Amino acid sequence: MPLIIKAIESIIRWIGEKSSYINVLLVLIICIDVFMRYALNTTQTWVIELEWHLFAMIFLLGASYTLQDDQHVRVDLWYADRSVKTKAWINLTGTLLFLVPWCLILIHSSFNYATNSWMMSEGSPNPGGLPARYIIKYCMTFGFVLLLLQGIVVIYRSAQSIFSSKSIKS
């Protein structure tokens, strides 16, 4: 099992690091859009939609990486001053009760949503918008699959902490 865990972590880290470059691309596109709007008094629908899609991809591909580095939002009031085992129990419980079920629901529904979009060759409803809207919709599915995989790693690591012989206060 540790080999699978390490493989999942490596894949998520690689995707997270590579997807961070989407930020650079997004900033460049926004700068071009702002220049076109204020200097040339024009804009393109596809540029605005591309900004939205890239912004969504940053979060969809980065969420699992954020969870892996334990940088996600949590209520530290009940977490910060706890022992390693208590933190592991909180992580295990939260992952099993909230993360895993919601990822499964969202993977299922977003996959159907994207597949319907693909089947009808959905494009933007706006004139001059982006074609192939299903691409960003499949990114939702992929992002939640990555998040679910990282959830499996959290479950494994939490169980490892809970059942280890050490009881350390962090």
Image: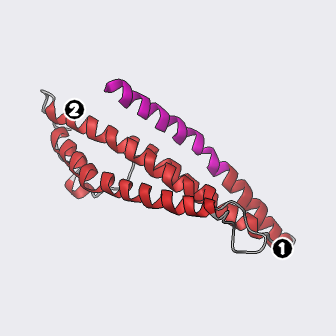
Front residue of 106/23: it is: 106
Horizontally, residue 17 falls left or right of residue 27, namely left
Q: Amino acid at mark 1?
A: Thr
Q: Between 70 and 108, which is closer to the camera in this rendering?
A: 108
143 on left or right of 151 = right
Give the secondary structure at mark 2: helix
Residue 13 on the magenta segment: yes
Q: Secondary structure at mark 1?
A: loop
Q: Is residue 4 above or below residue 136?
A: above
User: Which amino acid does the dot numbered 2 rest on?
Assistant: Gln
Q: Is residue 167 above or below residue 62?
A: above
Q: Report the residue at 60% width, 57% height from top.
A: 136
Query: Where residue 152 appears, x then y in whole percent?
Result: 32, 41
Instruction: Give the residue number, with chain letter if any, for mark 1.
Output: 42
Query: Within 10 Å of the Cα at label 2, are there few (<14), some (14-19), or many (20+) other Cα atoms?
Result: few
Residue 156 within the segment the image draws in magenta = no
Magenta: main secondary structure: helix
Say above or below: 73 vs 148: below
The residue that mark 2 highlights is 160
Give, as a single range, the part of the protein colored magenta.
1-24
Q: Quadrant of residue 157?
A: top left
Q: Position of residue 129 (x, y in %)?
A: 74, 68
